[in-house]
Amino acid sequence: MSLCRDKQIKGFLLFLCLFALLFVGTGTVLTFHQVNDVEILWLTHDEAVVSSLLEQGVPKEVIAVAFTNTDISEDGRSLLAAAGLGKQSESSMRPYFNQFLQSTFCMMLCTVLILLVVLAMGIFVFLRKRQRLYQQADKVLTNYINGDYSCHLPQNYEGGIFQIFSSVEQLATMLQSKNETEHKAKEFLKDTISDISHQLKTPLSALAMYQEIIENEPDNVGTVKQFAAKMGISLKRMEQLILSMLKITRLDMGNIIFEKNKCYVSELISHSINELTTRAKNENKQIQVDGDGEQQLICDMAWTSEAIGNIVKNALDHTQTGGIVRITWERTLAMFRILISDNGTGIALEDIHHIFKRFYRSKHSLDTQGIGLGLPLAKSIIEGQGGVISVQSEIGNGTTFTLSFLTEL
C-alpha cells in the first residue's frame, strides 16, 4: 500500500497496532482480575452464610447438603425475595455485591481514561508532525512564489505526500531554469544591443562628418570622390557588423539548424577562400592549401566555409607583406582536423584567452582591420556542429587554429 510508504503514517499505524494490543491485553488482564474477585466475593459470601447458620445451631450435615444443592424451588426464591435479597432488591441490602460493583466501575473507568489519554497523545503527536511538515512545505512554496529557490521540500521518504513534494520540486526546477534562461536572454539582448550601439557609433560619426564635408564642398570633385569612397567603406563596415551580429545572435539562440552532409574537404576549403585569394594577391601574401583531395567531412558546407573564411581573413589581417597562410587537414580514427596556420605577428599570451570574445581587440593589433566578430562567429559555427576550435600561438612565430570534428562511423 502507498500509505505504508509514508514514514509518518507508517509510524501512526504502528502506534494504532500497539494500542490495539494494549487494549486487548488490558481487557484480558481485567477479565481475569474480575473473575478472581468474583470467586473471592462468592467464597466470602458462602463463609458468612455458613458462619450464620452454625451460630443458629443448624447441623453441619444440613449446611453441607444445602451448599451442594443445584435445584431451585419456588419456596427458596420466595424466601429470598421476602428477605430483600432477590434480583430486584436494593444494592445496599447486598454489601458484597455493592463493594464489587464499585471497585469494578472505578477500575474500568480508570483503565478507559488511561487508554483514551494514550490514544489522544498518539493522535496529537502524529497531527503535530504532520502540521510541521505542512508548515515547512508552505514556507518553501512561498519562497518559490517569491522567486527564492534556495530551500527545498523534503524528498527523503516515500509516500503520497512526498511524491507530491517531488513533483513540486521538479516543477520548481523547471521554473528556476526557465527564469534563468529568460534572465540570460534578457542580459544577452541587452549586451547585444549595447555592443551594436557602441560599434555603430564610430562609423555613424564618420558618415556624418563625411556628409558635412561633401555638403560644404559640392564643387570640389576630388573631395567628393574621396569622401564618398570613405562613406562607402563605413557603410560596408556597418553592413558587415550588423550581418555578423545577426548571425551570432541566431546561433547563440539556437535558431539555426545545421544541414550536415558529406562534402570533399578540398571543395570546402576552395569555397571558403574563394573571395580571399584576390585580397591575398593584392597584399602580396599567399594562401597555401595542402591535403588529400579525396578526404570527406560531414558538416554544413555553407556555414563551415564561413567559419574557415573568417579564420583565414583574421590570419591575413595579422600577416605582414610576403606572409603565408597555410591550410592543411588530417584524419585519425577518432578525429578530423583542419589546421589553419600563418607566419604572422602571433598572439600575446595575455590575449590568447580572449580572442573569441566579441569585439575584442588586442592592444598589439589596434592598427589592423576587422571588427572583432570573425573569430566569435567561427567559434559559434564550429561548436554548433559539435566541433571544437583551439588556437596555439607565440609572439613573432605565427598562429595555428585547429578545427576538430568527431569522425562519424
Image (cartoon, rainbow, N blue to C red):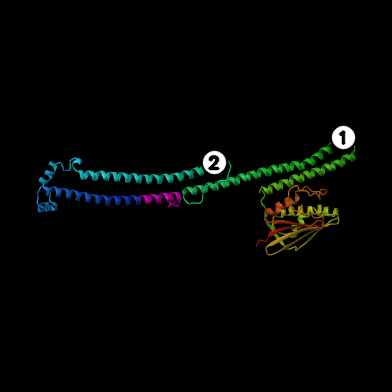
Q: Quick one: SS at disc 2?
A: helix
**Label 2 environment density (alpha carbons within 10 Å; few <14, some 14–19, many ≥20):** few
Amino acid beneath label 1: Asn
Residue 14 falls within the magenta-colored stretch: yes
Quarter of the image that includes the C terminus:
bottom right
Q: Is residue 16 left or right of residue 58?
A: right
Residue 118, x across and y down, in percent = 38, 46
Residue 254, x across and y down, in percent = 66, 49
**Range shown magenta:** 1-20
Q: Residue at x 51, y 47 (%)?
A: 165
Number of marks in the rendered image:
2
Q: Nearer the viewer, mark 2 or mark 1?
A: 2
Q: Which residue is mark 2?
A: 142
Residue nearer the viewer, 4 or 398: 4
Q: Which residue is mark 1?
A: 216
Mark number displayed over residue 346 = none
Q: Main secondary structure of the magenta part?
A: helix
Answer with the quarter of the image where residue 392 lies.
bottom right
Q: Residue at x 47, y 47 (%)?
A: 161
- Upstream in the sequence, badge 2 or badge 1? 2
Residue nearer the viewer, 27 or 332: 27
Q: Residue at x 74, y 46 (%)?
A: 243
How far apart are labels 2 and 1 at the CA level? 67 Å
Is residue 262 visible to us here?
Answer: no
